[in-house]
Image (spheres, grey):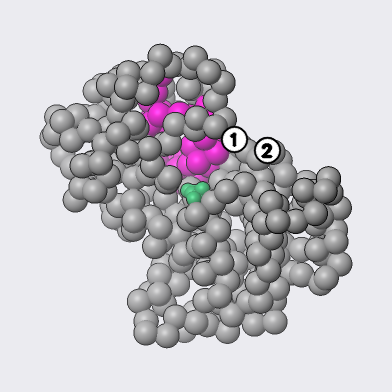
Amino acid sequence: MFSRKHLLGLDGVAQEEIISILDTARSFREVLERPIKRLPTLQGKTVVNLFYEPSTRTRISFELAEKRLSADIVNFSASASSVKKGETLIDTVRNIEAMKIDMVVVRHSSPGAAHLLARVLNAHIINAGDGGHEHPTQALLDMFTIREKKGRLDQLTVALVGDISHSRVAMSNIYGLRTMGARVLVCGPSTLIPRHIEWLGVEVYHNIDEIIEQVDVMNILRLQLERQRRGLFPSLREYHNYFGITRERLERATRPILIMHPGPMNRGVEISSDVADSEHSVILEQVTNGLAVRMAILYLLAGGKSEIH
Ligand code: CP
């Protein structure tokens, strides 16, 4: 059962808590197929979406999830706020909380920003991505998608491919998938894989062609050019040649591999367009499932226990 006040990351979240979120999300996924998708679950609750970094999927998905659950919503964008006049994160959120809000969804470039808010606010905090640290709702929607497609998470081999060093999606996937019993491989150039990452229970590879025969799922990560210092690989063309997932590469596999990407994609760099749009790709299903997973998290954090009708 999931009975936490906040969702700050998946590090330390137990298997039964993850199962509870995924099972609840399955009920909400069914609600999303109905002609009327709105439920009264969060009526009277106010949720603030506090985005200090750009986002398409996560921001819109949270906003839609909150609307589907009948919450009152406030969207905060740092670029149109008094942050521009030098107001700190703490002062900003204390002022927002003074307006009697119940939940904060926060994305920030600083690792630990969500943890900081959880210490100073009474509201429920949901981490929507904090620097290169964690992105728990993305990993939960990734696990939901894998479980729906493969029927399980244990006894599967999942590869996280590409820029592991700068990826909060990778960290949350590693914590969640290991807790759920999956075998997790990371594959990329050594300059983009953190030293000692095997301490987290993952296997490290530097050759894509070596893992193709072993994996059930490939979660292909964006090259986070905005977070990287220069010189971590010679050129985008060379990166694509060595690590880009192409149809030619996938055709060497003897069984179909589920292709995932959290977005936004660099088409022609970490993934070729024909793979992104192929029959094995579930990239857009991940986005649909993300809505159900975020509804589940909002519902559970608000204390939801009853059947979802
Ligand atoms: N996957 C993800 O976090 O995408 P956005 O940056 O568009 O929210």
Q: Is residue 158 left or right of residue 54?
A: left
Q: Amino acid at mark 2?
A: Pro
Q: Which mark is residue 143?
A: none
Which corner quadrant of the image does residue 75 belong to? bottom right
Counting from the top left corner in percent of width and height, residue 232 is at 48, 17
Which corner quadrant of the image does residue 248 belong to? top left
Q: Is residue 98 left or right of residue 81?
A: right
Q: Nearer the viewer, residue 281 or 270?
A: 270
Pointer 1 local density, CA inside 10 Å: few below 14, some 14–19, many at least 20: many
Counting from the top left corner in percent of width and height, residue 67 is at 56, 75
Q: Residue at x 65, y 40 (%)?
A: 109
Is residue 154 at all visible to an observer of this figure? no
Report the quarter where the N terminus lies: bottom right
Q: Residue at x 39, y 62 (%)?
A: 288
Q: Is residue 90 left or right of residue 32?
A: right
Q: Amino acid at mark 1?
A: Gly
Which corner quadrant of the image does residue 156 belong to? top left
Q: Which mark is residue 111?
A: 2
- Would residue 161 be counted in the magenta stretch? yes
Contact between labelled residues 2 and 1, with CB atoms less than 8 Å apart: yes
The stretch of residues the image draws in magenta is 160-189
Is residue 176 at all visible to an observer of this figure? yes
Q: Nearer the viewer, residue 18 or 140?
A: 140
| Mark closest to the chain's N terminus, 1 or 2 | 2
Q: Which residue is the site of mark 1?
A: 132
